[in-house]
Amino acid sequence: MHPNLIGGEWRTGEPFLNINPSDLGDVIGEYARATVADCRDAIAAARGAGKAWGLTPPQARADLLYKVAAGIEAEAGKLADLLAREEGKTLREAAGEVLRAVQLFRFYAGEALRGPGERYDSSRPGIEIQVTREPVGVVGLITPWNFPIGIPTWKIAPALAWGNAVVLKPADLVPGCAWELARIIHEAGAPPGVFNLVMGRGSVVGAEIIDNPGVDAISFTGSVETGAKVLQGAAARGAKVQMEMGGKNPLVVLADADIDRAVQVALDGAYYGTGQRCTASSRLIVEDAIHDRFVAGLAEALAAQVVDDARKPGTTIGPVVDQRQYEQDLRYLDIGRGEAHLAWGGAPLERATRGFYLQPALFTEVRNDMTIAREEIFGPVAAVIRVKDYEEALAVANDTPFGLSAGICTTSLKHAQHFRRHAEAGMVMVNCPTAGVDYTAAFGGRKASSYGSREQGRYAVEFYTTVKTAYQAM
């Protein structure tokens, strides 16, 4: 049994199983499902510990984060194996995500020491103005299953760095990485109540975090539908909210692009991570002059991919995360077959172990008003939309309710610069995958993709702190 961490104590509960999507006969472990009472106790513990933690000297907070980074690094191989085993991400991708967790804790350890603030001379004589940042208080973190250590880390690290107390509710599909992260934070010496882990159902644990007046701020990453409930509940009581949700990200490929590079960029952005990334390039918008060459090149690249057990050497694409997501992918594949042309893939696969294996799929002859071009599939599926020129490509790219990431492959500086300025997305990529981001830069989107301030980098200070302006007569 892997218990919840509440007020510095490990608390058991009703067990639920963590299953390997590469091998449905492999039970990773039993994890304790938190109750409403558990969640309330965790929030109360955070409130009790939060004030003292917020007044702790920055060096002490930085030291804790450095210790956590060292703890993750010391167990990097074990954590990468666990991540691949419980989420289905290949070992190579899992190792990269664990490394990112180390980097994030180190980065925010440094940020804890910088003490953001400003001083002004007042417009009135003899008065000094100081603008400082203080912890927002108790922060509830609700994280998704597709980055089971990366996304919790990029929320936990800045929250702790700037003096907040944390209540983490990870996705119940992937409790393993969150539990190990909680253990490492606990063993690094986090004061009791400063960091709390409550695992279980969103309808129970997530709902309590949203509604409980003891939670001052909520950072959520997940679906648009759930995000709407988070916003509605938090707004009703005036809690601070930050949300990252869906995407239907365009990758524009112009006639002047390096075709080989464009194929690799599309392959990486659309299919790696089994396409289960909010930044995935699910719409490939290709200029007519090179459309057929690009499709042929991408189909050839897909044929070379190895879909198998995430931990098996040579695997390039792992399984879909669970039965529900697998069935959703199959449903969209059926819809796509009725709307467009399935140019490659899309077949269920059998491997040595029973798992949710799916051949990556490529649709062509897609219009931007089709279901497969409008709705987020969140699987290894991409749709190619043929356009006549750059102007049409830009219009199609922006014609979506989402606005997280947008990419373009071109050798034209003119078009690259124009696209960077006019793409309606929070992040723009030129000749690189839409799914690759740096932890030192702002992460977030526009329209239905995001709500509130940005995550990662120094921009995270906007959410995890509140501003205080003080006037003092000299």
Image (cartoon, rainbow, N blue to C red):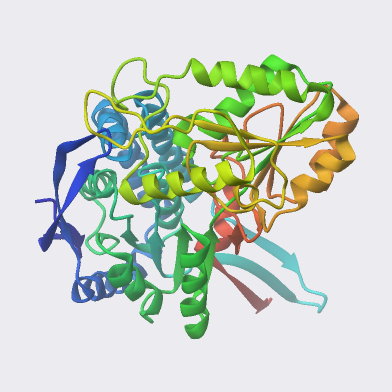
Residue at screen point 56% across, 57% down: 461
| Drawn side of residue 141 relative to residue 461, left or right | left
In the displayed structure, 451 sits above or below 143; it is below
Q: Pinpoint residue 474: horizontal percent, then vertical percent.
A: 69, 76
Residue at screen point 11% across, 63% down: 14
Using the image as rendered, state which of residue 188 and residue 272 is in the foreground.
272
Using the image as rendered, state which of residue 185 and residue 380 is in the foreground.
380
Q: Residue furthest bottom?
A: 236
Q: Pinpoint residue 420: horizontal percent, then vertical percent.
A: 80, 40
Q: Pinpoint residue 10: horizontal percent, then vertical percent.
A: 13, 58
Q: Pinpoint residue 288: horizontal percent, then vertical percent.
A: 82, 28
Q: Quadrant of residue 347?
A: top left
Could one spot residue 279 in this view of the protein?
A: no
Residue at screen point 31% across, 47% down: 323
Using the image as rendered, state which of residue 362 and residue 178 is in the foreground.
362
| Drawn side of residue 67 relative to residue 353, left or right | right
Residue at screen point 26% across, 29% down: 81
Q: Quadrant of residue 409?
A: top right
- The number of numbered badges drawn on the structure is 0
In the displayed structure, 240 sits above or below 279; it is below
Q: Residue furthest front?
A: 338
In the displayed structure, 247 sits above or below 303; it is below
Using the image as rendered, state which of residue 224 and residue 78 is in the foreground.
224
Could one spot residue 386 in this view of the protein?
A: yes
